[in-house]
Image (tube, rainbow, N blue to C red):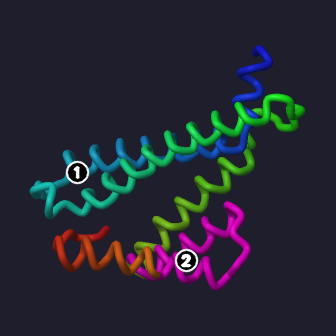
Amino acid sequence: MDGHKKKTLSNPEIQDGIVVLILGVALLIYSLFMHYTARVQTEWKMSPYLFPVLISVFAILLAFSLFADGRRVMASEEKKKDSGSLINLKRVVIVALMAVVYEVLMNITGYIPATVVFLIAMIRFFGEKRWWMIVVIAVATSLIIYLLFGILLNVRFP
């Protein structure tokens, strides 16, 4: 692998973008497959898989934003020494395991508690240190999504 590709893949924003893109595409494929193979066929607006499809689209858009940020950072720091490995496999595995735990927890506790716990863990994992900020973002995001989709749009949550 040439130096430029190695430098690109060692950029933390690019690595995060790859993880988010993989998870977004996987969630999109899973949601579409589950919707079209469900025993009881429903319209998309009533499907419990509409929300995961929307989340996957936002995750894919976020991934491209992370790629753009990574390229911008690389352009501004061309003289900086290459200090990383390729993709940090440990981070990828941790994020994937957190998503699996979220799915299991959602089946046990329901959407809002599981999402709050998941968001707290993800935000903390990605580096935010202010606990009050983490809790506010996690609770507000969970409640806003529930109000918008569950109450206003009457979308069934998984």
Q: Is residue 29 left or right of residue 38?
A: right
Residue range in magenta is 111-139
**Residue 137, percent from left and from top:** 52, 76
> Mark 2, residues whose alpha carbon is within 10 Å: few (<14), some, or many (≥20)?
some
Residue for point 43% across, 74% down = 141
Residue 47 is situated, as x and y percent measured from the top left of the image, at 19, 60
Say what secondary structure mark 2 lies in: helix
Q: Depth check: give the residue in front, 154 or 109.
A: 154
Amino acid type assigned to the residue bearing label 2 in the image: Val
Q: State the residue in front, 61 or 89.
A: 61
Image spot of residue 39 (x, y percent): 16, 55
Q: Secondary structure at mark 1?
A: helix
Q: Which residue is mark 1?
A: 35
The residue located at (56%, 38%) in the rendering is 68
- Would residue 30 be counted in the magenta stretch? no
- Which quarter of the figure is the N terminus placed in? top right
In the rendered structure, the answer to whether residue 85 lies left or right of residue 151 reads right
- Horizontally, is 115 left or right of 48 in the view? right
33 sits to left or right of 141: left
